[in-house]
Amino acid sequence: MMKREQFGANFKWGVTISAFQNEGAASADGKGPSIWDTFTENIEQIKNNDRIGEASQFYTRYEDDIALARQLGLNTFRFSISWSRILPFGIGKINQSGIDYYNRVIDCCLSNGLMPFVTLYHWDLPQALEDKGGWTNRDIVEWFTNYIEICVTNFGKLVTNWIVMNEPMSFTGLGYFMGYHAPQRTGINTFLKAAHHTVLCMALGGAKIRELQPHANIGVALSCSYIQPVNQSPKNRRAAKRIEAMLNRFYLEPLLGLGYPFDVMPALSIIKSFFKDGDKQRMVFDFDFIGIQYYFRVVAKHSLTPPILFAKEIEPTTRKAKLNSMDLDVYPKGLYKLLKFYSRYPQIKELLITESGVCYPDYLVRDHVYDVRRTRYHQKMLKQVLKAQRKGININGYFIWTLVDNFEWREGFEPRFGLVHVDFETQKRTIKHSGRWLNAFLK
Ligand code: BGC
């Protein structure tokens, strides 16, 4: 039987939440609107026409929720800061109530024995900055580093673990290429411009933290997928390599000094039209850790569209796959393969799993949620972590997405990922089977 001790005494056991998905209180105490406040105003864009309302009310219930995390036996708590709570318009006047709020959250983590990991950007760009072009405006480098400076100055006395950015590929791909997420912009040039500025912000943001707090532990959290070609034909194998370059290498390699993955996608070099002199160097930063977030496997095949990629995913619903409630292919064995993939980069010092989770329809029956499938999922994922450690891979943390059920972006409240069930009518919390298992395991 798997035991906690096998992972090492310094292993970080955490949960991850995010400001927009949990806090609610969209305009409380001076907070300005973010692009996700704007997006969710139109409830027709959200699955089941769900209204975000107060989300899972972390803004007012943070003490109870953090106490729950402690009760589960964790030692680490990852949350994100809402930029527009600190700077309602993204730049300019600081909102002291926002600073005070996050200081209370940080204090609360520490008094519960939880090490705070603070994400500086989890997709909720201040609307005022989007009105100026958002991630496609190069000024964002200045806006972002200014915001980081304010955060490190105000929270750096008690926080040393920083995640500069959460899943850049998700918010630029879905928000600036496919138009599926806020701010609903589309097109390859929009995407590449936003992407290049995002890379600069990650590296220069990291450098800003280092300058202000030399002993800080600084990382980024990157989404990744285990990718397989549909068959071994050279055409499909090359297609899988291109998807791999996009999903697993694109946002990592420039940070490590390797540049964008032009090797398998020469046409991607149009991104260079957004470079300024010196950018190659500006894109590089020596991160202390790389956070990886793996939710699903992708099976790839060659395709004539979209340009540059010339590859497509074969929908998991049309092949034999174990699906979660968002119809994504759940494949825990892919985790070891991914850890192995990332361990090949000598520049990476440490790996953490900064998010890992699965959504299934959960049912509350007489105060119990019997989510055994979620329990098994985390057990299987942890076995992959152990296997990687045994092979000498430096992986030192597992953060579960997520603590309590919350607002899953465009999918609304339907997908439930939490270890703790939330009745969104009453906000009542009920620890699920998976939460109870975790607690017993960590004891
Ligand atoms: C994101 C979370 C999201 C989760 C589940 C990650 O991509 O960081 O915000 O809720 O996956 O889909």
Image (spheres, rainbow, N blue to C red):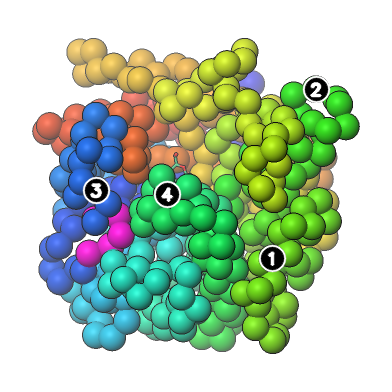
The image shows residue 341, relative to residue 212, as above or below, that is above
Q: Secondary structure at mark 1?
A: helix
Query: What residue type is disc 4 on?
Result: Gly
Q: Give the mark toward the camera: 3 or 1.
A: 1
Residue visible at 24% across and 74% down in the picture:
88
Look at the image and give the residue range highlighted in magenta: 33-37
Q: Amino acid at mark 2?
A: Asn
Q: Which residue is mark 4?
A: 179
Please say whether residue 35 is one of the residues in the magenta stretch: yes
Residue 28 is drawn in which quadrant? bottom left
Say if mark 3 contacts mark 4, CB within 8 Å: no
Q: Element at badge 3?
A: helix
Q: Earlier in the sequence, mark 3 or mark 1?
A: 3
Upstream in the sequence, badge 1 or badge 4? Answer: 4
Binning the other alpha carbons within 10 Å of mark 3 as few (below 14), some (14 to 19) or many (20 upward) gives many
Residue at 25% over, 18% down: 364
Q: Give coordinates of residue 61: x percent, y percent.
A: 19, 49
Q: In the rendering, at what x and y percent does residue 240 appear? A: 75, 37
Q: Which residue is mark 1?
A: 270
Q: Nearer the viewer, residue 277 or 91?
A: 277
Q: Which residue is mark 2?
A: 231
Separation of disc 1 and disc 2 at Cα? 30 Å
* Label 4 residue SS: loop
Percent x, y of residue 29: 13, 68
Q: Secondary structure at mark 2?
A: loop
Q: Earlier in the sequence, mark 2 or mark 4?
A: 4
